[in-house]
């Protein structure tokens, strides 16, 4: 469904990704792992067209989208939840969802309700400004917002980072539900090994902008792999 080949990305003169290959088959949950600063966020931003690529191609369902703007990728069915649960802090929860719905060009308002069904805890907060939500609630809103565009692939960058443990479990359960029950393909950057081991069909380990290991989810239990991830 998603196929990245030979991807190179640089910030000015500082090259960060060096020929990264990555494939996410339809319905799969793929995890990108690696220490801080190895290029995981850069990779997702390039996949979503937030950052330009220096070389390489990104294909989605067979189509070359390497030069396509982000909003068109979203319309093709790619939903993105960037690192740091970014929401529009000055807008209410309801407005955050509505703005995304309007931008998506959808005529079908029921997608907002569907997104709220996934996160019922957001319903009593609809009139609250997003900036006043807890980190966990903001992350739920960020995922709900991505769902409003009805993605077929969900791309999440460290969705449980810095969030209170009780909500981490809820977020993990939602990702599992979307993947297993609704058949969404998922590309996930995750530092927590337990979560990745429980859910990932396959994983890719990055180190200094290079893929240093790839394998099936079960191999994450191997000591050699865990050493690559140790901080
Ligand atoms: N906007 C930027 N300008 C310059 N360098 C950046 C920028 N964003 C990230 N980097 C650098 O790129 C490298 C990879 O960063 P990032 O993709 O955020 O890593 P990760 O998500 O794996 O922690 C790091 O060395 C980081 O300092
Ligand atoms: Mg990152």
Image: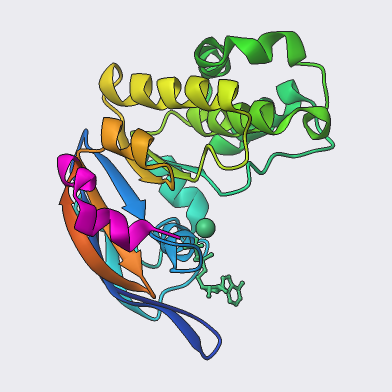
Foreground pick, 112 / 224: 224
Q: Is residue 1 visible?
A: no
Identify the image quadrant of residue 175: top left
Identify the image quadrant of residue 176: top left
User: What is the x, y in percent for residue 222?
Assistant: 19, 49
Vertical placement of residue 215 versus 201, above or below = below
Query: Main SS type for the magenta part?
Result: helix
Residue at point 47%, 72% (across, down): 52
Q: Furthest-front residue in view?
A: 223
User: What is the x, y in percent for residue 84?
Assistant: 63, 47
Q: Is residue 195 visible?
A: yes
Q: In the drawing, does residue 177 fall left or right of residue 112?
A: left
Residue at point 75%, 39% (across, down): 88
User: What is the x, y in percent for residue 180?
Assistant: 27, 21
Residue at point 20%, 41% (across, down): 217
Q: In the drawing, does residue 203 fall left or right of residue 140?
A: left
Number of marks = 0
Indicate yes or no whether the magenta region holds residue 226. Answer: yes
Residue at point 33%, 33% (across, down): 152
Identify the image quadrant of residue 155: top left
Vertical placement of residue 160 versus 12, above or below = above
Q: Furthest-bottom residue in view?
A: 13
The quarter of the rendered structure image containing the C terminus is bottom left
Part of the protein shown in magenta: 218-231
Indicate yes or no whether the magenta region holds residue 52. Answer: no
User: What is the x, y in percent for residue 216?
Assistant: 14, 45
Foreground pick, 230 / 40: 230
Foreground pick, 189 / 9: 189
Vertical placement of residue 99 versus 228, above or below = above
Q: In the drawing, does residue 197 fall left or right of residue 114?
A: left
């Amino acid at each position: 469904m998603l196929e990245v080949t030979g991807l190179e990305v640089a910030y000015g003169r500082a090259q960060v990704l060096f020929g990264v290959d990555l494939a996410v088959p339809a319905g799969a949950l793929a995890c990108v792992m690696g220490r801080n600063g190895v290029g995981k966020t850069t990779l997702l931003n390039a996949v979503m067209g937030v950052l330009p690529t220096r070389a390489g191609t990104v294909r989605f369902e067979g189509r070359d989208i390497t030069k396509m703007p982000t909003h068109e990728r979203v319309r093709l069915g790619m939903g993105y939840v960037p690192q740091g649960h970014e929401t529009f802090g000055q807008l209410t929860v309801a407005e955050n969802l509505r703005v995304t719905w309007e931008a998506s060009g959808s005529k079908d308002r029921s997608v907002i309700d569907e997104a709220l069904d996934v996160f019922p805890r957001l319903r009593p907060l609809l009139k609250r400004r997003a900036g006043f939500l807890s980190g966990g609630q903001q992350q739920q809103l960020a995922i709900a917002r991505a769902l409003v565009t009805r993605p077929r692939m969900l791309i999440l960058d460290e969705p449980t980072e810095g969030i209170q443990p009780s909500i981490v479990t809820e977020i993990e359960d939602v990702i599992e539900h979307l993947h297993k029950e609704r058949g969404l393909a998922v590309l996930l950057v995750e530092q927590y090994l337990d979560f990745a081991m429980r859910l990932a069909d396959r994983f890719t380990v990055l180190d200094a902008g290079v893929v240093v290991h790839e394998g099936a989810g079960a191999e994450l239990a191997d000591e050699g792999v865990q050493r690559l991830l140790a901080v």
